[in-house]
Amino acid sequence: MAKASARHILVPNEDNCNNLKAEIEAGADFAKVAKKHSQCPSGKQGGALGEFSPGQMVKEFDEVVFSGEVGQVLGPVKTQFGYHLIEVTSRTE
């Protein structure tokens, strides 16, 4: 079964999400940005979510993690929780 590891940053609105993505693309450290801005408890670990399989996360999140490019900052991705920036750190098929 496929598995992936990812980290994310959760914020309440799309503008905030886009601004943080621009910061990261300009060289800011993903983990530091997550610690400072993410509203998810995983922010304390730099946004790290550990390893999971399809179906363990909400549908919108899963679709990006299991189809997006590994190592790229993906998003904004809207879910019931808010807006996410997602970085897939590894994936096995």
Image: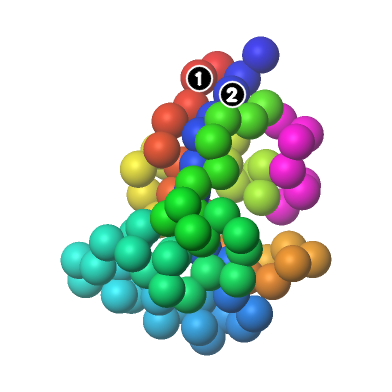
Residue at 51 percent of width and 60 percent of height: 43
Q: Is residue 75 visible?
A: no
Residue at 42 percent of width and 73 percent of height: 36
Residue tagged by mark 1? Answer: 92
SS of the residue at dot 2? strand
Residue tagged by mark 2? Answer: 3
The alpha-carbon separation of the residues under discs 2 and 1 comes to 5 Å
Q: What kind of residue is marked 1?
A: Thr
Residue at 75 percent of width and 36 percent of height: 56
Q: What kind of residue is marked 2?
A: Lys
Residue 41 tag number: none
**Residue in front for this viewpoint, 33 or 15:** 33
Indicate left or right for 5 with 13 as reference: left
Q: Are marks 2 and 1 in contact (CB under 8 Å)?
A: yes
Q: Residues within 10 Å of mark 1 (few under 14, many from 20)?
A: few
Residue 84 drawn at (x, y percent)? 58, 64
Q: Residues within 10 Å of mark 2 (few under 14, many from 20)?
A: some
**Residue in front for this viewpoint, 45 or 10:** 45
Magenta segment boundaries in residue numbering: 54-60
Q: Main secondary structure of the magenta part?
A: loop
Outermost residue toward the front in this view? 44
Q: Is residue 51 visible?
A: yes
The quadrant holding residue 70 is top left
Residue 67 drawn at (x, y percent)? 56, 38
**Residue 58 is one of the magenta-drawn residues:** yes
Outermost residue toward the bottom in this view? 15
Residue at 56 percent of width and 55 percent of height: 42
Indicate left or right for 53 with 46 as reference: right
Residue 91 drawn at (x, y percent)? 48, 27
Q: Which quarter shows the C terminus? A: top right
